[in-house]
Amino acid sequence: MQNNNEINKLKEMVYDQVLDEVGLGHFYRFIMPEEVLVGPGCARKVGKEAAELGKTALLVTDRGIIDLHLHNSIIRSLEKEDIEIKIFDQVQSDPDDKIIKNGVKFAEENNVNFIIGLGGGSSLDAAKAISFMINNPLPISQYEGSNKIKNKGLPLIAITTTAGTGSEVSASTVVTDSSKNKKMVISSKYLVPQIAVIDAKLTVGLPASITAATGIDVLVHVLEAYLSKDSMTISRALADHSIKYVMENLAQAVGNGNDIEARHRMCIASLMAGMAFSNVGLGACHATAHQLGTTYKIPHGVANAIMLPSVLRFNKMVSKKEIAELAHVVGARTEGLTTREAAEAVINEIELLISELNLPQTIREIGGKKENFKSMAEDALNDPTLSTNPRQANLEEIITIYENAF
Ligand SMILES: [Fe+2]
């Protein structure tokens, strides 16, 4: 006769089987910052939030931010709470392990209690890397990949000055390995900032071309999260609203950089996109755009803008229903259309936005050469972002994606 334990085990197995059959057999994990401050001017309030984190802060940023005095209101707010600020402003775009090592040394010499990252993706990624490396041994390369960080880092406040990367809410950082000239993606729950600060006022001075490129990056984050193999209800809900905000506000923010309402909505779109993709991954647009960006030294958002229509048309074969469902948020007319035609109408609408922003739309326009496609496709196949693309792609298919974007 079976004992109670065995009977309970059998019951659990049957129950799990039933859950699998009704599509509820998967478990989800959704990671977010403990606190998100949102609203034009909210960076001025950061001192109050920071007061409980300690008396000495390390501000990680770049010279451009200091020259524009974007840090002034934040410093004043911290000083009001008697917080001492040490500034590390050596961050450069695509920060490498040497910069991180210098930042860690500077933080240790000054006995800081917590870290504030201020800037675009590079400054926030550097702040995240410095924060965790203070409590984990060198070299940083041993943490490349997922969940390899053993110890929690110093508390981190991430204040974004662009509406694009989503780094302020994501669980990853990108650091260049200087010995191999290769980007390392490090992912861990310990990289999610405690506090994310989304203040559209800090984005007002961004030039139109950067606003356009970072805005398209937001759109790609959210589209890839929406179509991801790992997508879930929470991420799809975030994606829905984020796509709508980009489609309605990006051209406005590019055309009139002082439009604080459009800037604010782009910041919200970026925040929601960051939360979505950070939890469910990206796809073939990022995988192919990463190689295009590295090969031709073009900004990440520009590379995404070039690759997006070609990748969406590739994914349409398996995701036409999901793409067609976006008609209401992108503003595409689909009355009387088949699902296939509706999906194409959505992609056309996205292409129209990219052309309105005056971003390059083809690899030819940036001086790209077809002879590089094979090696770029080989690297794209190994890009970790490809793993959540809804349609599996082989080498030949990725070459075709590049050819269609040529
Ligand atoms: Fe991106």
Image (cartoon, rainbow, N blue to C red):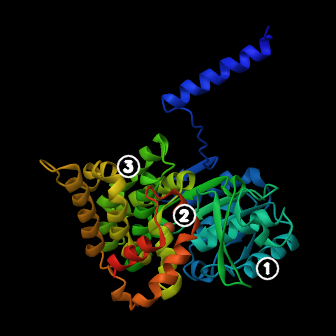
**Sequence-wise first label, 3 or 2:** 3
Quadrant showing the C terminus: bottom left
Q: Is residue 172 left or right of residue 244?
A: right
Q: Which residue is mark 1?
A: 102
Q: Position of residue 17 (x, y in %)?
A: 58, 27
Task: Name the mark on residue 241.
Answer: 3
Instruction: Classify 163 as above or below 271.
Output: below
Residue 57 visible to the viewer: no
Task: Name the mark on residue 288.
Answer: none
- For the residue carrying disc 1, how many other residues have a C-alpha within 10 Å: few (<14), some (14-19), or many (20+)? some
**Contact (Cβ within 8 Å) of mark 1 with mark 2:** no
User: Which residue is nearer to you in this view: 311 or 266?
Assistant: 311
Residue, far left: 336
**Sequence-wise first label, 1 or 3:** 1
Mark 3, mark 2: which one is toward the viewer?
2
Numbered disc 2: secondary structure: helix
Amino acid type, callout 2: Thr
Image quarter of residue 345: bottom left
Q: Which residue is mark 2?
A: 385
Q: Is mark 1 within 8 Å of ligand 1?
A: no
Image quarter of residue 124: bottom right
Numbered disc 3: secondary structure: helix
Image quarter of residue 174: bottom right
Q: Position of residue 132 (x, y in %)?
A: 77, 62
Q: Residue at x 46, y 65 (%)?
A: 393
Amino acid type, callout 1: Asn
Q: Position of residue 403 (x, y in %)?
A: 35, 79
User: Which residue is nearer to you in this view: 96 or 225?
Assistant: 225
Numbered disc 1: secondary structure: helix
Mark 1, mark 2: which one is toward the viewer?
2
Residue, far top: 1
